[in-house]
Image (spheres, grey):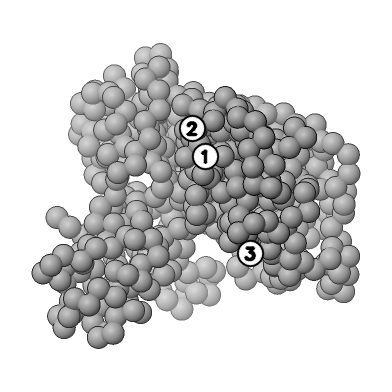
């Protein structure tokens, strides 16, 4: 008999097939991105509210079923499924009420008549949510700590060892939403910074998730050596580059095998550009404004700007938690990094450019805790009760960064620092004037412990399957459309085509969703309505 563990992430879906008798991982499958339109959790949430929960659930489950179908096991022998993810993704997966997640705070709930769900641990028939498994198969769902602090955050706290740490420590899942927690004594302060998709290699011109062929790092060796993920997701040396000249100095083992770049690769490119003094005031001072890497892969000014905004959001989040806890940077020495970016990024470079506090001198890189937790639950279903007890016992002070004045003040300084080249001395002077502590300089070399070589430590004997063709289509037929095609031409992601009869087809995984809608704005007849799009049968 088999089990399936699932990580429903904002940037994509990951799954393991597990032999239940031995607990052995047999195979792994993952998507390149999320099947829902949009690039972040708020895009997905907005899409769900405006086009309907049923449509969002149907799109997600169609891809989940495609993923589990690629695991290479007999799905008729699946006995149980365990999932993990943030509250919005797990709610979409279960086709649950999400209004309490869309509107923050008790006042908003009261004004809109919203009753928040508790989202405790539960076990239900897997077929209830639309999984293509036997009727007898169970679905195991871990608890959220609070409605906005989900099972993925709980996994991060438990799997990292953060909860057992006696000293002040910080943990961050370096993804699209950047969930983070600060532990000071018995108090835990949590937050989620909308870092954006750059950390996952999305909204990057040559970007991709951490998968084979992705440039994941640049390592200094008198020039800069690319690190490229191989078929087992292990970083292997690629070409040696002169970034200033844009030339290959020496071909490496992975020459000819790079097909894109991850968010960690962009972070490394930014660190390298700063070291080589070719990134100043939001500009790359190189030919064509591009950092040329290997095999035709490059990083643009826009790519680095996107990464810089993500770094700024994360640093502002860390800063804000410290301020709310009432401690100084000098009181924080221990850092846990999870997620793909937290695994593959060079932690010393990351500390230097602001992805983690400058005072951290003990850094642990721990991999994908969400999929790991789902797999633990699969092997030991009674773990759900233990997790519920832990969730109930966590005394968490959640900081809503979106409405927090401290976060806003710091993030404004971050934007000025990255985009306008504001000196760090002025950055700190502005914070001091606002009554906020200054940002210390990076000193010394940290002690770095890499718990795992890759984001997903075990792939199984059957290996990894990357699913590129997934998702579904939305269709639109609008009365009054004269088939001018302007909506199609305006789509920045080439997600749309128009058939001769005027029917518009939008590939959901490529569409930027309600955060974009350039297709609708471009319609000269104003007959195109994004919210009237329907799912194909």
Left or right placement of residue 314 versus residue 50 in this view:
right
Mark 2 in CB contact with mark 1 (< 8 angstroms) = yes
> Which residue is label 2 attached to?
257
Which circle's residue, 3 or 1, is located before the other in the chain?
Answer: 1
Residue at (62, 71) in percent of width and height: 403
**Image quadrant where one finds the N terminus:** top left
> Which residue is label 3 attached to?
401
Instruction: Give neighbour class at mark 3: few <14, some 14-19, many 20+ (Cα, 10 Å).
Output: many
Instruction: Give neighbour class at mark 2: few <14, some 14-19, many 20+ (Cα, 10 Å).
Output: some
Can residue 187 be seen here? The reply is no
Residue at (67, 35) in percent of width and height: 249
- Taking depth in this image into account, of 476 and 80 the one nearest to the observer is 476
From mark 3 to mark 2, how far is it between C-alphas? Answer: 40 Å
Can residue 10 be seen here? The reply is yes
Give the label on residue 396, or none: none
Task: Please tell me whether mark 3 sits on a helix, a strand or a loop.
Answer: helix
Image quadrant of residue 177? bottom right
């Amino acid at each position: 008999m088999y089990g399936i563990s699932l990580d429903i992430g904002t940037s994509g879906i990951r799954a393991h097939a597990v032999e239940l008798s031995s607990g052995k991982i047999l195979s792994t499958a993952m998507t390149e991105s999320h099947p829902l339109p949009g690039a972040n959790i708020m895009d997905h949430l907005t899409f769900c509210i405006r086009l309907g929960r049923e449509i969002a659930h149907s799109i997600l489950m169609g891809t989940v079923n495609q993923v589990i179908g690629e695991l290479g096991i007999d799905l008729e022998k699946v006995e149980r499924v365990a999932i993990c993810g943030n509250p919005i993704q797990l709610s979409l997966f279960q086709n649950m009420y999400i209004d309490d997640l869309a509107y923050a705070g008790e006042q908003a709930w009261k004004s809109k008549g919203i009753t928040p769900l508790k989202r405790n641990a539960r076990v239900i028939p897997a077929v209830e949510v639309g999984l293509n498994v036997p009727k007898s198969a169970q679905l195991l769902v871990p608890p959220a700590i609070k409605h906005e602090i989900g099972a993925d955050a709980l996994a991060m706290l438990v799997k990292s060892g953060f909860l057992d740490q006696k000293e002040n420590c910080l943990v961050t899942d370096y993804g699209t939403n950047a969930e983070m927690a600060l532990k000071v004594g018995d108090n835990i302060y949590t937050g989620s910074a909308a870092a954006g998709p750059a950390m996952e290699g999305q909204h990057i011109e040559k970007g991709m998730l951490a998968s084979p062929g992705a440039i994941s790092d640049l390592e200094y060796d008198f020039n800069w050596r690319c690190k490229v993920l191989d078929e087992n997701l292990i970083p292997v040396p690629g070409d040696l580059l002169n970034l200033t000249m844009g030339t290959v100095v020496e071909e490496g083992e992975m020459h000819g095998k790079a097909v894109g770049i991850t968010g960690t690769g962009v972070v490394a490119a930014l660190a390298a550009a700063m070291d080589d003094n070719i990134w100043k005031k939001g500009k790359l001072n190189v030919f064509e404004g591009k950092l040329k890497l290997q095999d035709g892969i490059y990083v643009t000014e826009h790519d680095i700007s996107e990464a810089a905004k993500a770094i700024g959001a994360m640093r502002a989040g860390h800063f804000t938690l410290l301020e709310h806890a009432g401690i100084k940077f000098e009181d924080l020495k221990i850092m846990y990094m999870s997620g793909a970016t937290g695994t593959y990024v060079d932690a010393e470079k990351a500390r230097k450019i602001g992805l983690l506090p400058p005072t951290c001198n003990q850094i642990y890189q721990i991999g994908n805790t969400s999929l790991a937790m789902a797999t633990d639950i699969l092997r030991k279903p009674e773990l759900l009760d233990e997790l519920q007890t832990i969730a109930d016992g966590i005394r968490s002070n959640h900081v809503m960064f979106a409405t927090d004045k401290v976060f806003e003040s710091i993030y404004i300084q971050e934007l000025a620092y990255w985009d306008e080249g504001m000196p760090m001395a002025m950055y700190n002077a502005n914070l001091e004037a606002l009554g906020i502590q200054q940002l210390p300089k990076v000193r010394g070399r940290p002690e770095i412990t890499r718990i795992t070589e890759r984001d997903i430590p075990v792939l199984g004997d059957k290996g990894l399957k990357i699913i590129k063709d997934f998702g579904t289509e939305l269709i639109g037929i609008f009365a009054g459309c004269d088939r001018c095609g302007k909506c199609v031409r305006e789509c920045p992601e080439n997600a749309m085509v128009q058939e001769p009869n005027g029917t518009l087809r939008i590939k959901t995984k490529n569409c930027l969703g309600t955060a974009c809608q350039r297709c609708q704005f471009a319609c000269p007849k104003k007959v195109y309505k994004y919210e009237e799009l329907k799912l194909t049968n």
